[in-house]
């Protein structure tokens, strides 16, 4: 008899302390030991995790009104510009924003860069941040300048809103040229000196739900140490990409837009980062629970690093000159071993995401659910999927006949 469960049934078991929760690492051995059907009957939720640099991130802040009031036209937080084209005292601080005062060569090698990601980390850590804002003066907002200190506690609202997080697979970056490259994938040494990658493999949320059967708009998640939600599909969401036999994309595919209360979060899971020769960003911790509604979903969560392949791309030619050429594909088991082979050469690998932190997130989320502190939220709308894309393409072809 086929295994069929509902969100309500699983949540009821969570409330009673009877739900069986395992991480995306633990489920692999469990399936090998007991098989898919038995494991699907026993397990209710599989927890995932990822922790790495996610440049398309930021926070909306509402500072509250001053006396007299000001309509902020330009806003700076610790010297870093925030976008103020919203309302009088609302602003959005982007993770990669850099101070206007820096010269154009601000990203030269060897220089630490303080940017928007660091502002967010400082706020979450409870530190004071300098707010300076300028207005143009109106009858209702006469003030033209304000300079003060704020903390996360002192401002009205603050919520993280990240337009593109948790990429579903990503390229492995190498450098075939004779010079060192400074990129968002880190420093790439010349002549295949290293290979840089940035996904948590078998723990990564969207690699455990490749067709978004359970992850959708409204899904409750671990975000930055607090509770957040999937708000929409992320920018550059591209589910209709080449996939392997297990449904896992062979290149970058789905992404998530996520939202959560910044005042719940922790600097352990939101860290400002500085990339030599490139700029500033934010490392974000995300964990997503996958309800085991049936055997199909269980089978997807049992994917291992050896079964997940990523494309190897030469960043010296692919960026920014032309569409990337795939040199080869390697598994995450090979990447995590510390060395891969590209064009016959053994190349050391350098991870930009932390597998240890991803594991910790999956374990924290597991504990939250086991203690009844975290219930599953059924999506109110599915994310665009490869299956939906195939249907849409078929309709377009039919209409064009």
Image (cartoon, rainbow, N blue to C red):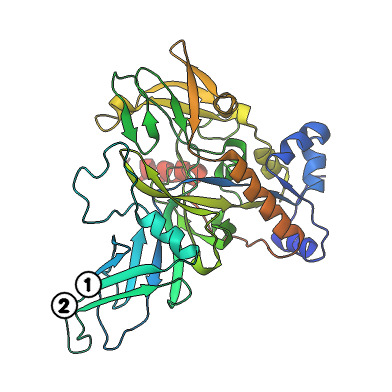
Horizontal and vertical percent position of residue 202? 62, 37
Q: Quadrant of residue 81?
A: bottom left
Quadrant showing the C terminus? top left
Is 211 or 281 nearer to us in this picture? 281
Q: CA distance from mark 2 to mark 1?
A: 7 Å
* SS under mark 1: loop
Is 128 left, or right, of 15 in this rendering? Answer: left
Which tag, 2 or 1, sits closer to the chain's start?
A: 1
Is 80 or 211 nearer to us in this picture? 80
Q: To which residue does mark 2 refer? A: 136
Is 376 left, or right, of 138 in this rendering? Answer: right
Quadrant showing the N terminus? top right
Confirm whether residue 211 shows in the render: no
Is 220 or 148 nearer to us in this picture? 148
Residue drawn at point x = 70 percent, y = 42 percent: 298
- Circle 1: is it few (<14), some (14-19), or many (20+) Cα within 10 Å? many
Tell me the number on the disc at residue 181.
none
Residue drawn at point x = 57 percent, y = 30 percent: 308
Q: Are marks 2 and 1 in contact (CB under 8 Å)?
A: yes
* SS under mark 2: loop
Horizontal and vertical percent position of residue 103? 19, 48
Q: Quadrant of residue 40?
A: top right
Horizontal and vertical percent position of residue 156? 43, 78
Compared to 260, does 154 lie above or below? below
Compared to 64, does 40 lie above or below? above
Q: To which residue does mark 1 refer? A: 73
């Amino acid at each position: 008899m086929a295994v069929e469960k509902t969100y309500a049934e699983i949540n009821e078991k969570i409330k009673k302390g009877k739900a069986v929760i395992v991480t995306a690492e633990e489920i692999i051995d469990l399936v090998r030991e007991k098989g898919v059907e038995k494991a699907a009957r026993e397990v209710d939720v599989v927890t995932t995790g990822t922790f790495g640099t996610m440049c398309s991130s930021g926070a909306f802040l509402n500072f509250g009104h001053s006396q007299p009031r000001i309509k902020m036209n330009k806003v700076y937080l610790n010297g870093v510009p925030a976008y103020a084209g919203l309302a009088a005292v609302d602003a959005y601080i982007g993770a990669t924003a850099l101070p206007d005062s820096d010269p154009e060569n601000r990203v030269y090698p060897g220089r630490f860069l303080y940017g928007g990601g660091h502002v967010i980390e400082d706020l979450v850590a409870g530190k004071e941040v300098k707010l300076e804002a300028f207005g143009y003066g109106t009858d209702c907002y006469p003030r033209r300048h304000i300079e003060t200190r704020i903390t996360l506690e002192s401002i009205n609202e603050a919520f993280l809103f990240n337009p593109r997080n948790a990429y579903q697979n990503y390229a492995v970056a190498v450098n075939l040229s004779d010079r060192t490259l400074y990129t968002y994938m880190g420093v790439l040494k010349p002549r295949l000196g290293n290979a840089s990658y940035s996904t948590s493999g078998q723990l990564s949320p969207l690699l455990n739900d490749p067709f978004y059967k359970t992850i959708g708009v409204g899904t409750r998640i671990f975000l930055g140490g607090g509770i957040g939600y999937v708000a929409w599909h992320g920018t550059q969401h591209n589910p209709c990409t080449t996939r392997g036999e297990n449904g896992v994309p062979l290149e970058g595919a789905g992404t998530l837009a996520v939202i959560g209360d910044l005042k719940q979060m922790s600097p352990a899971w939101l860290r400002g980062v500085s990339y030599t020769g490139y700029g500033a960003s934010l490392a974000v911790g995300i964990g997503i629970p996958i309800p085991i509604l049936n055997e199909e979903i269980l089978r997807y969560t049992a994917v291992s690093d050896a079964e997940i392949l990523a494309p190897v791309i030469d960043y010296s030619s692919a960026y920014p000159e032309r569409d990337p050429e795939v040199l080869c594909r390697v598994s995450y088991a090979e990447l995590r071993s510390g060395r891969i082979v590209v064009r016959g050469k053994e190349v050391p690998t350098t991870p930009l995401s932390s597998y240890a932190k991803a594991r910790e997130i999956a374990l924290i989320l597991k504990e939250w659910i086991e203690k009844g502190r975290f219930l599953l939220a059924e999506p109110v709308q599915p994310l665009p999927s490869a299956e939906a894309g195939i249907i849409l393409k078929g309709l377009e072809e039919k209409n064009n006949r």
